[in-house]
Image: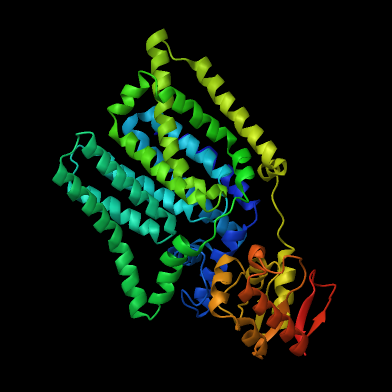
Amino acid sequence: MTRLFLLLILFCPVFFLFTYNSTYGYDALEYLVIARSLNEGYSLYDFIPSKSYLIYASTNVLLSLLGGYNHASVSGLIMLLAMGCVLSAWRAARQFGERAALITAALTAACCFFMEMNFLEPESWIGIFGLNAFLLATDGKEQSGWRWLGAGVLLGIAMCFKSVAAFYVVGFGAFILLLWLAGRLSFWPMVARGMLVLLGFLLPLSLSALYFYVTNRLDAHLEWTYIYPFGGYPSHTIFLVKFLIKLSWFLLLLAVSIVLMVRQPYRAAYQRTPALWLALLLAGFSCIAMLKTQASHYFFPAAVFFSVHLGFMADKWLGQYERRYTYVPYRSIFMGVGAVGILVLISAFLYRPDAIKRFVTVADYSGEKEAGDFIREQAGPNGKVLLFDNALSLYYLSDREPNVPFFFTEMQTTHYIKSHPDTYKHALADTSLKMVVFGNRSSVIDDSTALNNPANAYAIRQLRAGLQKNFVQVKNPRFPLLYWVRK
């Protein structure tokens, strides 16, 4: 416990500084602008979300408690979530020994730096709930039904933050089936455990659906929580090379651990420790999400359980050394920690050397206020704005909303435009729209891969026509982008 406390004392201030200097991040800005819109009289699903509803509702509530929408409060929230991941990892691995738990916690802390947890990502919540569901199902002499039911409930809550948590449920199902195939569980207890996990998982989802049904938002809830994430989001490999470089240190550790795992006595230790089967299954099934995109935060739900595996393997290796040489291998420990540290630094320098500055400077964000003030001035007290270029950042800084149901033009908006092709036409005809920022970049919209999609192309033509008819383009030295104001 003392060593964990020292780890957290070291981790929290360093991670807070790193987060504060990292700016908000693209995804985080979307969570922040929709969360803040809940204070402006809007409701969930008035704007198209990119994630499940709890990331927005929880962000709004927690930031209200922490001091509002500013860099310090947001960084504080992110630090608390990362600390929750580290503590949850330590608790989940403690059943394998104190040393294994400490190594697991340290690896999880390192993952937070390399897997974009310095931004406000829902994967932090998924890691916390997933690790505690794992603990509930494995760390108990009496494997009573309520533990499996409780694990399912935690996974259901995680699903309300981001849909990829569903892969944890698949991992639990595979684990229960494997216990039966291995002769550790008879048929009907296997069925009972599986049904309890499924029942617990469905409980938060059913309550959520009931709430949105009563408030006449069920269709939007189903669309953006289930239908689009699993069926509509396109796959790509844009971030694959960055992923391999950035996480090379972690992938190398995994490769070494797998080589050790197939050898005795590690193989025997795995065979008699079913909890580790569950950890690897949860990690493995979580990797399915990366078939969509290889952004490093997509790997975090898998990494927290791979860290449990690595912590166990490192503890066993150290135990073998101690039994062989009858003394604590401090030299080997320091060499091992040093080697991992060198791998981490090499990965960081190969990926983004300037990220090192985030540990030794304090960012100055005073200039952000000017852009926000300018947009508010152009829009007036009740006017709307429609922003395409640098949209999420400008929406957030100006605290102004558009007269369309989205803040960005990513894949979700492309999906929406297919069934609402006249959205831009109606938006520009609305006299409450006072300012449009458009035409400053070659990609035109965020989802540049779908720019030539027929519905998108038609909508953009209407946008250009509406701008020429009702607006005039302006360049002002007080604002860095070309913009349009109503004639």
Q: Residue at x 66, y 90 (%)?
A: 429
Q: Is residue 282 left or right of residue 47?
A: left
Q: Is residue 124 left or right of residue 136?
A: right
Q: Residue at x 64, y 90 (%)?
A: 430
Nearer to me, 356 or 444? 444
Residue 454 occupies quadrant: bottom right
Q: Which residue ends up furthest to the front in the rendered image? A: 454
Asked if residue 472 is positioned above or below residue 174 in the image, the reply reads below
Nearer to me, 212 or 119? 212
Quarter of the figure with the C terminus: bottom right
Q: How many marks?
A: 0
Q: Residue at x 56, y 19 (%)?
A: 335
Q: Which residue ends up furthest to the top in the rendered image? A: 325
Nearer to me, 241 or 429? 241
Asked if residue 34 is positioned above or below residue 115 in the image, the reply reads below
Residue 332 drawn at (x, y percent): 51, 17
Residue 19 drawn at (x, y percent): 60, 50
Residue 26 drawn at (x, y percent): 62, 59
Q: Is residue 9 left or right of residue 181?
A: right
Residue 53 seen by the camera: no
Asked if residue 172 is positioned above or below residue 479 in the image, the reply reads above
Q: Residue at x 48, y 39 (%)?
A: 108
Residue 197 seen by the camera: yes
